[in-house]
Amino acid sequence: MDFLFQSILNGILAGCIYALFAMGLTLIYGVLNFVNFAHGELIMWGAYFLYFLMGKPFGFPLPIALIPALLLTILLGIGMDRFVFKPLRTANRLTLLIAALGLSFLLRNGAQFLWGAELRTYGFEIKRGLRILGISITLNQVAIILTSIVCIVFVYLLFHRTRLGKSMRAVSDNLELARVMGIDSKHAIQFAWVIASVLAGVGGILLALDTNLQPGMGLINLVKAFAATLLGGVGNIWGALLGGIVIGLAENLGVLVISPGYKDAIAFGIMVLMLLIRPSALLGRQE
Amino acid sequence: MKRIVHLILISLGILIFINPSASAQDTYKIGAAFALSGAIAVYGEGFKKAVDLAVEEINTAGGIKGKKIEIVYEDNKSTPKDCVTAVRKLVAVDKVPILFGPAGSSNFMAAAPVAQESKVVMLSAQGAAPALTKAGEYIFRVFPSDVLQGKGISDLCVSLKYMEVPIMYVNNDWGLGLKNVFVENFKKAGGKVTDEIPYDDGKTDYRTELIRATKGNPKAVVNLTYITSGAVMFKQTYEMGIKTQWICGSAAKAPKLVELAGKAVEGIIGTYPVFSQETKEYNAFRAAWKKKYGDDKVPIFGEYNYDMVYITAKAIEKGGYTSGGIQKALFEVAKGYRGVTGDKTFDQDRGVGSEYGVWTVKDGLIVDYKK
C-alpha cells in the first residue's frame, strides 16, 4: 500500500510544479491572448539567477539571494514584454507565437552561453526525507506544496478582490473597451508580467532545488504545464491548479500499471481526450 | 535610444548564435558533431576538452607533415535529427573526409548512414550499442561494444548473488541494446528479471519509476543510466529512503555524477571497460591533462576521445587526406597501436575489444570495486 500513497504524493508534487508553471502561462494568455512559449525560459532563468547570486563572486546564502533573484526574473519578464511583445501588441497571433518561440531559443542559448549546457546544482547537501505513515517527503517537497498553495491563493485574491486584479480581468475581456472605460491597460499588462515572472521564478527555483539546473529545464516541464492549462481551461487560475494535479497524478499512477516508457503519453492522451470530449475543459470559462 | 538598444540586442543575439570557427586553407580539417547543448551536453563538453588536448599536442609537435589539424565543431543538440543536420553540414559545407560522430548510440546511429552514403569516415569514441557499426565500412568505433558489457553486468550480479533483479534503462538504442544483452546473459546464468522499466533521459522527476522498480524491496536494481538522469534518480532514491544496491553500466561512471548527487551515490557499483591507468601512455595523458586544465578530473570517456584523435592523425599521415585513404589506413595504423585506453586494433566489425572492471563510489570518489 505504501507505494500507492507514495505515488499519489509524487503525483501531487509533480502536479504542483506543473500548476505553478501553468498559472503563469494562463495569466499571460488571459490578459494578452497569446501563449507565451518563452515562459519555460523565464522559469529556467529564475533558477539560474539564484545560482548566479549564490555563486562567486557574490556567495549570498539562499534566503538573501532569493529576493534579488526574483527581482531579476521580473526584470527579464518585463524586458521580454517591452522589447518583443509590446511592439507586436496588435500583430496577429501567429506572429506573436513565432516571436515567443524565437525568444525561447534566444534565452535558452543565452543561458547556455553564460553557464554552459552541463548540469548544475545549488550545492546543498542531500537529506533523507521525513517518514510519515510509511511515505517519505523532504522539506523541499513540503515547500513546493505549500508555496504552490500560497501562490494560488494569492493570485486568486489578487484577481478577484483587488482593483488591480479587476482591471487585469477587464483588459483580458476586452482591451479596447477597458481603455475606453478609463482603465490603465498598460499598467495592468505590466502587472500581469510581474506576477507571471514571480510565479515562473518561484517555480523554477523550487524545481531546481528539488532536482538540478539545466538550460532545458523549463522547456521539458512547460509542455506538461501547457497540457495542464488546456485541461483546466485556458485563462482559469483554479483550472491550472486542477489541471496540473490531474496530469501529475495520472502520469504517476499510470506508471504503476503500464510501462514507464509511456509516461509522457498519459498526459497527452488525457489532453487529447479532454479536447475531444469537453473542449470547454474541466472548469470551462464562462463566455 | 531605441535604435541603440535594438542594435545591442541584435548583436548580442548574433554573438550567441555564431560559432567562431576560423577556417584556414593550410590545415587538415576534421569534423566533430558533438553534443554541445541539449540533454547529453554533459558528455559533449568533456569530449571536446579531451579532443582539444590531443589536437594541441599534435599541432605543437609539428602537426601532420607540417600541416596543422583543425577541428570543426558542430553542435548536434543531443537529438538524432540535429545529429543528421550537423553531419550533413560537415560533409557538404566543410567537406571533411573524416569526422568524429555524436555521443549517444541513438544519435550516432541516426548520423551514421549519412556519413556512409557520403563515403566519409565517421569515428565514435563512446557509442556502445552492439549495432553501432552496422551502417557500413566507413563507420568505426574506438570504444568496445556492449555485447561485452551486458555480459559483464550479468556476471557481476551473479557473482554478488543477486539472482532476482528488476532492470531500469534509458529508453534509447544504447539502453535497449545493453538491456537485451544483459537479460539474455542473465537468464542463461539462471537469474530472473522481475521487472523492466524503460525511462526517458533528461527528466526532472523519476520518483514513481523508482517506486515501481523497488516494489517488493529487491536487494539490487540494475540501472543502465546516464549521468543526468542517474544523478536525479539516485538523489530521489536517497530522499525517499529507499535502500537497495544499484548496479550501473559505464555511462554513469563520472566525477560529475558524484558532484551532482553527492552522498546519494555512495556505494553504487557498475561495470566499465577497463584499461590500465599505470601505463606510460596513461601517465603522460594524465600529466598533459593536468597541465592544460589544472585538475585531474578527466571527464568520462575523455581518454577514448584522446586516442581517437591520435589514430585519426596517424591515418591521415599514412593514407592521405581522402576518405578512402583514411578508411584503409585506419586498420593499419590502429593495428597494435597502444593508446591511453590500451590496444586499439580494429576487428572485422571496425570495433575494438576490452576487459571489463567494476567501479564504485567511495567517500565521494570513483574507485575500483573490491568485494
Image (spheres, helix red, strand yellow):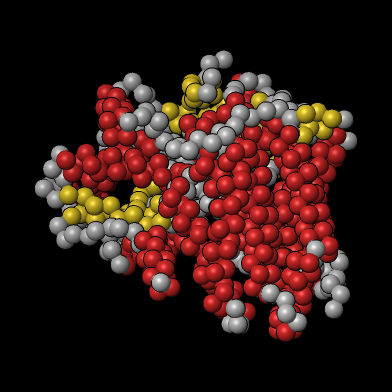
The reply, left or right, for residue B201 in relation to residue A254 is: left
Residue reaching furthest left? B66
Q: Quadrant of the C terminus of chain B?
A: top right
Residue B180, compared with residue A138, is above or below; it is below
The answer to whether residue B338 is visible is no
Taking depth in this image into account, of B208 and B225 the one nearest to the observer is: B208
x, y percent for residue B83? 44, 59
Q: Nearer the viewer, residue B99 or B315?
A: B99
**Where does the image place residue A231, in percent across and percent down from the top left?**
79, 65
Residue B301 image offset from top left, x and y in percent: 41, 37
Q: Nearer the viewer, residue A234 or A2?
A: A234
Q: Name the residue at 64% across, 60% down.
A: A194
Image location of residue B48, percent across then percent down: 36, 45
Q: Is residue B288 above or below residue A119?
A: above
Image quadrant in which you'd find residue B2: bottom left
Give the side of residue A155 with respect to residue B332, left or right. right
Q: Quadrant of residue B237?
A: top right
Q: Nearer the viewer, residue B177 or A57?
A: A57
- Quarter placement of the N terminus of chain B: bottom left
Identify the residue at horizontal 50%, vertical 63% (top origin): A105
Task: State the residue at coordinates (46%, 56%).
Answer: A110
The number of callouts visible is 0
At horizontal 24% and vertical 58% (from top left) the residue drawn is B22
Asked if residue B150 lies left or right of residue B72, the reply is: right
Query: Does residue A239 sit above or below A1 in this rendering?
Result: below
Relative horizontal placement of residue A101, taking residue B60 as reference (left or right) = right
Vertical side of B216 occupied by A216: above or below: below
Asked if residue A169 can be seen in this view, the reply is yes
Q: Residue furthest top?
A: B371
